[in-house]
Image: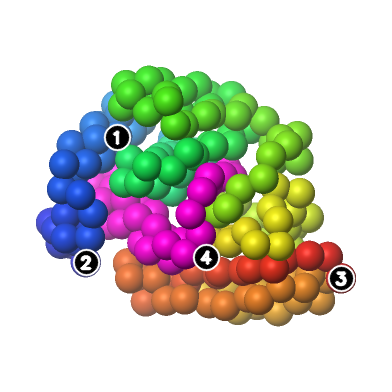
Amino acid sequence: MTEDEARRWINACFDVSRETLLVELTALIVAEAANQNLVSASSLESLWTRHIVDSAQLIPLAARHPGSWIDIGSGAGFPGLVVAILTDRPVTLIEPRRKRAQFLERAVAVLQLGARVTVVAARAEQYQAKAAVISARAVSAVPELLTSAAHLSTTKSLWLLPKGPRALEEVEAARRTWHGSFHVEQSITEASSLIITAKGVARR
């Protein structure tokens, strides 16, 4: 998928009027690159493919789970800010690193999303809330993530966890200590990228 193909995919799947905010988000990330590495330098020229579409593809998977969305380890805003731009959901961005949380706060203000988006500058363990959907991209292995964040979910919550080729190994490791319905979906961005979905998660 090229950058042009990625933008066409976004416009085909979502309200085309929201593309302007995504363009603004990418500009903010590129500008911030002089201050901190929100994303790898090598991916700055492929933000739409590597990050925007990679985040947006989670939204259809959550269609049957309306309500609030918590994104753990939001970093540059992926996937949480993309979800907030492309949907009308309340979104909480949890980011423990101070400089990244400050960037997220500025981005939320610039994009005028403050009515629906909350930035929490803390670790997931320190935050108390429940959400219909919980996402985490490149944060930690699934067993460790569930240990630190399961209190944010209910038995009806949907977990969406973009992963690399070791996704199946992480699922098997999680099943040793966690009940739940775990599945692995193919990402549309790369053949080696997978998405773990989980429901009914509870400790054994």
Instruction: Locate residue 118 relative to residue 122 in the image: left or right.
Output: left
Q: Which mark is residue 1?
A: 2
| Picture layout, residue 60 above or below residue 170 | above
Q: In which quadrant is the N terminus drawn? A: bottom left
Answer with mark 1 or mark 2, whichever residue precedes in sequence: 2
Marks 4/1: CA–CA distance: 23 Å
Mark 1 vs mark 2: in front: 1
Q: Which residue carries the number 1 mark? A: 25
Tell me where the magenta segment starts and ends, as one range. Answer: 44-73
Q: Which residue carries the number 4 mark? A: 163
Q: Are marks 4 and 3 in contact (CB under 8 Å)?
A: no
Amino acid under disc 1: Leu
Work out whether residue 143 or residue 19 is closer to the camera in this orientation and state it. Answer: 19
Element class at badge 3:
loop
Amino acid under disc 3: Arg
Q: Which residue carries the number 3 mark? A: 204
Instruction: Locate residue 53 relative to residue 176 in the image: left or right.
Output: left
Q: Position of residue 105 (x, y in %)?
A: 46, 23
